[in-house]
Amino acid sequence: DVKVTQSSRYLVKRTGEKVFLECVQDMDHENMFWYRQDPGLGLRLIYFSYDVKMKEKGDIPEGYSVSREKKERFSLILESASTNQTSMYLCASSLAGRADTQYFGPGTRLTVL
Amino acid sequence: DQQVKQNSPSLSVQEGRISILNCDYTNSMFDYFLWYKKYPAEGPTFLISISSIKDKNEDGRFTVFLNKSAKHLSLHIVPSQPGDSAVYFCAAQGAQKLVFGQGTRLTINP
């Protein structure tokens, strides 16, 4: 059974803190994605990665960075958290060339105070 | 600039009836369209897809229709069941990534 796990279900941080969100997949997928989900805006792509050490900006990369040192792990970093980064963060993975069928983790609800 | 739009934030349907969820897109270069379903506290799960070269794809109770000239797709669920209550996201694939709509919350009433 395919599985994408995210390090935390709920996270509360203060403005200015550095925040790490971790995502691990056990399907040997090449592609990994980070989205944020906000009411009325749907899922918006922050960053994605085709392979280890590779990254591509999505539609809303500002204020975020990513790291992919191992194939199974994709980290999202908020260098200096702000209140407008309060959101649900979803990680996903897919096979190479198959960005259509993505497998999602359960999400991390991040609140920045 | 929203390339994929779901204009109905919510939809309420009687159990056993047909549910129709709609989605519009602007980019004619999209080559694949998908529907994902999301329950609370879970990540979205893939439901059904359609290639841009087709106009219909059916999988059990779920059928997706694509009208390329109108840049419109729809998801039909028949008959609707209580377990279908969820948020449904339309998505379009282009350049090795997906663009999602805003989502429609479907509620099936007994």
Image: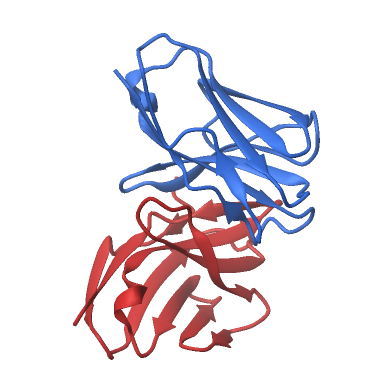
Chain colours: A blue, B red
Residue B27 against residue A81 in the figure, above or below: below
Residue sitting farthest toward the top: A16
Hey, which quadrant is residue B80 in on the image?
bottom left
Residue A55 % position (x, y):
72, 32
Residue A5 against residue A20 in the figure, above or below: below
Residue A49 against residue A95 in the figure, above or below: above
Q: Classify residue B53 as left or right of residue A18.
A: right
| Residue in front for this viewpoint, A1 or A46 | A1
| Residue in front for this viewpoint, A43 or B30 | A43
Q: Residue at x 57, y 61 (%)?
A: B92
Q: Classify residue A22 as left or right of residue B103.
A: right
Q: Classify residue A24 as left or right of residue A105.
A: right
Q: Which residue is drawn at 70% across and 35% down?
A: A73
Image quadrant occupied by the N terminus of chain B? top left
| Residue in front for this viewpoint, A27 or A42 | A27
Hey, which quadrant is residue B93 in on the image?
bottom right
Residue B90 % position (x, y):
47, 63
Count all numbered tags in the image, as a single digit. 0
Residue B65 % position (x, y):
50, 82
Residue A7 % position (x, y):
53, 33
| Residue in front for this viewpoint, A111 or B18 | A111
Q: Which residue is drawn at 25% across and 64% down?
A: B10
Image quadrant occupied by the C terminus of chain B? bottom left
Residue A3 against residue B10 in the figure, above or below: above
Q: Which residue is drawn at 38% across and 72% down?
A: B22
